[in-house]
Amino acid sequence: WSLSGVVSYNMVKLTIDDTEVMRDYTYSLKTLKAFSLSSGANLVFDAGVNIHSTDSDSSGDYSGRDEMNRYDISSSLALNTELGFLDATPKYTLQYSDYSKGANSDRSQFLHNLSLKLSYDITEHFDLELSTGYTINDSSGSNNDDDYEMFDAGAGLKLSARSESTRL
């Protein structure tokens, strides 16, 4: 098992006048466990809790200073395996979010995401990655219709650098 804690900062900035309209400080605690399977594949389970503390400006798409405050509970299951010359990682994630302030005070949502990442090793340090994902968001209790379905796809090059130390 592994355990990690993370503090992160995200923002939304308007390009018209360079105004920062939302700030999101996120405090996260996550746990992860990997299981080796007889086929050489790995099954990876993770679970986590996030607390979002936000501050927003009414000039953006937000009506209150802290209406995006929420906590998230999430869990995912991924399979890391090889398909011929490709590394493949199908993954399912479930996330529950509960909002606590302003126009969103009665809002909660379930997010389901099914994704697939394919990776091809070009060299020892460079990979070509292709990814796709399908997301369903089921939201209740807000003044807006926040339900949606979304399909994403992407590609990229990944540079990995590692250093190995020798124990004495």
Image: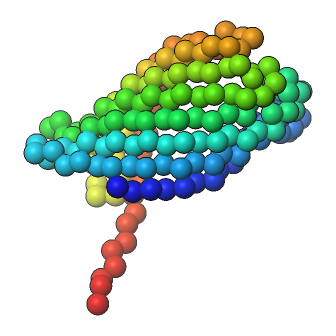
Percent position of residue 143, x then y? 75, 11
Q: Is residue 50 visible?
A: yes
Percent position of residue 140, x then y? 63, 13
Answer above or below: position of 155 versus 36. above
Q: Please name the residue shown 80% across and 33% down the image.
A: 66
- In-image side of 85 versus 149 (left or right): left
Quadrant containing the C terminus is bottom left
Res 84 quadrant in image = top left
Q: Residue furthest left?
A: 38
Report the colour scheme.
rainbow
| Residue sitting nearer the eye, 19 or 91 | 91
Q: Please name the residue shown 64% across and 42% down the image.
A: 51
| Residue sitting nearer the eye, 119 or 157 | 119
- In-image side of 6 versus 10 (left or right): left
Res 97 quadrant in image = top right
In this rendering, the count of numbered labels is 0
| Residue sitting nearer the eye, 39 or 150 | 39
Q: Please name the residue shown 45% across and 28% down the image.
A: 94
Percent position of residue 132, x then y? 40, 27
Quadrant containing the N terminus is bottom left
| Residue sitting nearer the eye, 10 or 143 | 143
Percent position of residue 22, x then y? 79, 36
Res 45 quadrant in image = top left
